[in-house]
Amino acid sequence: MKNFLLKTGLTLAFLTLLTCNIGCSKDDPVGDIEKEITIDMANEILQIVNNHRTSIGKQILEVNTLAENLAEEHNMFMIGQGDISHDNFSKRADRLFDEENAKGVGENVAFKQVSAEQVMTAWLNSSDHRKNIEGNFTHIGISVVKSQSGVYYYTQLFLRK
């Protein structure tokens, strides 16, 4: 009987620890899903941009990792501010000029649209944003981040090499 109670007690203790390790894990499956959704949206924006560019005889844009990272950082900054802006654009541009030997740089920002189609429609209906999308660029970095309050923030960084 003692062995049975000891084994049962150890089994229960093990299951409790296992459950806590799984249930108390720092992994955030909801956050992972949100990240996947925003990555999918960024990829969809890239596809829409490149489809639009080819429809007007322009070359497609290649993804640039530094531009993507800078776009992501800027989205996080805007979320912290609670508004969109081009604040510190010159610093992002300088990094692209210095580290990627960019010859030209442009930026589009937006927020509150809930899909890639909506944000691209808004940008294409704005002459200044359209100029960047249709501009003489070769590379792009796109970031989409959803704030804790559920608002999507978008940044596109364009560069010409």
Image: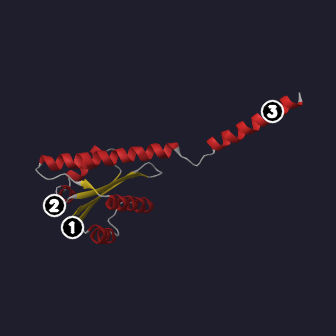
- Image: 129 above or below 39: below
Residue with the mark numbered 2: 136
Residue 61, position as x, y percentages in the image: 22, 54
**Which residue is farthest top?**
1
Please tell me the numbered disc located at residue 56: none
Image spot of residue 46 (x, y percent): 27, 49
Q: In this rendering, which labeled residue sits more in front, label 3 or label 1?
A: 3
- Residue 109 image position (x, y, % from top left): 30, 58
State the CA–CA distance, disc 3 to disc 2: 72 Å
Q: Horizontal and vertical percent for residue 152?
A: 38, 50
In the image, taking residue 139 as reference, residue 69 lies left or right, namely right
Q: Quadrant of the C terminus?
A: bottom left
The numbered mark at residue 7 is 3
Tell me the SS state at disc 1.
strand
- Which sits earlier in the primary sequence, circle 3 or circle 2? 3
Three-letter amino acid code of the residue under disc 3: Lys
- Residue type at numbered disc 2: Asn
Res. 138 image quadrant:
bottom left
Residue at (70, 42) in percent of width and height: 17
Amino acid type for the residue under numbered disc 1: Gly
Q: What is the secondary structure assignment of the residue under circle 2?
A: loop
Q: Which residue is mark 1?
A: 104
Kindly report the distance in space between the C-alpha atoms of the residues bearing marks 3 and 1.
Answer: 70 Å
Q: Earlier in the sequence, mark 3 or mark 1?
A: 3
Q: Are marks 2 and 1 in contact (CB under 8 Å)?
A: yes
Q: Residues within 10 Å of mark 1 (few under 14, many from 20)?
A: some
